[in-house]
Amino acid sequence: MYSSSTLSKATSRSVCNDRRLQPVMASTRPLSAVGAVPLPRLGSPNKLRIRLSSAGRASKQQPSQRLRPVAALPAVTLAAAMPPPAQAAMWMFLGIATVGAAAVCAVGYAAEQRAKAEQLEGAKEQPVAATAAAGKEKRDAVLVVGSAGKLGAEVTAALLAAGRCVVAAGRQSDESALEAALAEAGLKAGAASVGDGYLHLAPGVDISRPETLSRELFRGVAQVVAAVGPRFGKQADGSMGFGAGSSPAEVDAEGVAALVAAAQAHLPSVGTRRSAAEVLSLATEEDVQRWRPLNDVIMGGQSSSGMELLTNGEDGSAVWSGTVIVEGGGFCGLRTEPADLKLDDFDGIRLRVKGGGQRFKLNLKTEEQMDVPESTYQACFNTVEGEWVEVFLPWHEFRCVKRASFDPSGPPLDPTHVRQVGLVYSRFEFNGLPNPFFTPGEFRLLLDGGVSGYKDPRPEFVLVSSAGVERNARIGDDQEARARDIPILRLNPGGILNAKYDGECALRASRLAYTIIRPTGLVQPKEVEEEEEKEEGSGARGCRVLELGQGDVVSGKISRGEVARLVATALSLPEAVGKTVEARRCEAADSLGRVTNEKELKALVLSTHADWDRAKYGIPPFPRPVEYVSPPPPETPAQVDAPQQPEATEAVATR
């Protein structure tokens, strides 16, 4: 056991020898400032001496001797005049104080070590941070899996052209190998040559190995596109077949299922549903007074209407009521005072209304139309007699009209510029056609919660599958039906149609907002070149009008570029969520050389139906997946149907 004086000396020596404390200790006064102090004997053979040089300064000694605090000197001087018991008490107190100082220094040392460790860790991460700072940050990015393939490269190019931030994922083991593979398709990492697109690289991503689908891969990613497929070719032993980890089952079934699971685990917005926010309140009398009547009296009519705040306990916030007189006009209306409604972050307008089964119109007037009274954007909505209904009017339903007639020259509605909202009850629909749900006389429309904007989720996962997969599952083991069907169903190499359908089922069973696109036979590059030669000078680059189908009953061809444009469009449309569609070119003669533009692509997607509504529109339900059974090889070459062989071979080549 150490005495307090021994402990005091040991701790003070260890504390003062620590070079980390020298900057602090150096701030105290040097010993030369107080001169030599004669120290008395303290009942110990050891004597404390302070050695001074001839110049009166402390001679060069160990750091602990040079940096000892001067604050200790008065205590030494004071101890000389004390009796031995008092001296012992004083030295015990100083020993305890020194231990406390040592503890404080130890805490400081630990904190400093942690700071150093963090600094080192930051230094290790610095190259990654510098790389991110040198380029565009991954935000709201699209992860394209299979980007180095022919179709994946086209999808990547289409997204970059649309101004998206893209993460190109490929099996290549390092970045340079992936960069070289993308370069063959004219793609390179960094800013796109046209538009605001930016390309990030993600090598070493193999969906047949789920461990490569890490959380880091999905950092900054909002949407995923799977444009994957098995690799068929010459093997090491000289035979033809699928490579290791690249069979249809490993890629299209198990791999896609693993990618779906990873996306569901790591994407930030999984499970997001429709949201709404009020933009025009109807809670106070002042709110109601902002709605001004606009009845047919402006054109000599006799109809009248107005809005009132509901204060009598009736459900709702306000009621618009009036009387429509057909003679002289036949409409009632309301409109708000002009204001910036800030609707650009929404996908449309939401109302909660209760009426008498009539059909009403909602008017939106843009800043450009404020000086053109006869021009506005209109959409119609129906009510159910005596029941509250939620009405959702997407922007594409609003049509530019002039004097109640459709104006085809008007641009699509830009919600950023909307300045005024209105309601109309009229005996006319558009272009002079009658309103089928109009009744003259009195009407009432109750509104609850004012006018809101709503936003829908976009597809989080777009899977490029194949036409024929659903048909293959329906046929099952009916070999006679299979023999009568299209070549790809007769051949079904390696069970590729079964595997792709399994991948689809995994996606449909997930919580992801999805879109499944099934291209028909993919046009080979040589065919595209031939068509472009025929159309030289047309600027259409081998395109045709596109068609979409559902229920897997169509066949045909489509180019990879056209599929890519459809994928890019689907990613931007909330109306694409939950849909499975087949895509092909129209083979009509007048469709050759005609490009399906962005507006027409959106219209195609809007014309299709969600998977959960298939029965409503006469589309059969999805069949159960079936196991792939390899067809038996022909017993002799003579038994092979020779005329069908070229057709089957060609069908495989177009996939």
Image: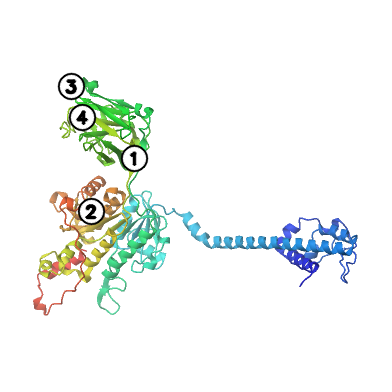
What element does badge 4 sit on?
strand
Q: Earlier in the sequence, mark 2 or mark 3?
A: 3
Instruction: Pick whichever, 162 or 326, lies toward us.
Output: 326
How packed mark 2 is, by other alpha carbons closer than 10 Å (few <14, some 14-19, many 20 or more), is few
What element does badge 2 sit on?
helix
How packed mark 1 is, by other alpha carbons closer than 10 Å (few <14, some 14-19, many 20 or more), is many
How packed mark 4 is, by other alpha carbons closer than 10 Å (few <14, some 14-19, many 20 or more), is many
Query: Circle 3 is placed at which residue position?
Result: 328
Callout 3, which amino acid? Answer: Gly
- Residue at x-position 29% and y-position 38%: 352
Q: Earlier in the sequence, mark 4 or mark 3?
A: 3
Query: Circle 1 is placed at which residue position?
Result: 453
Q: Mark 4 near mark 3, Cβ–Cβ under 8 Å? A: no
Q: CA distance from mark 4 to mark 1?
A: 24 Å
Give the side of residue 504 with respect to residue 290, left or right: left
Q: Earlier in the sequence, mark 4 or mark 1?
A: 4
Residue 109's x, y, as percent? Answer: 66, 62
What element does badge 3 sit on?
loop
One can see residue 442 in this view: yes
One can see residue 172 in this view: no
Quadrant into which the C terminus falls? bottom left
Which quadrant holds residue 22?
A: bottom right
| Of labels 2 and 3, the one closer to you | 2
Which quadrant holds residue 62?
A: bottom right
Q: Earlier in the sequence, mark 2 or mark 1?
A: 1
Q: Which mark is residue 156?
A: none
Q: Earlier in the sequence, mark 2 or mark 4?
A: 4
Query: Circle 2 is placed at which residue position?
Result: 612
> Quick check: 616 above or below 354?
below
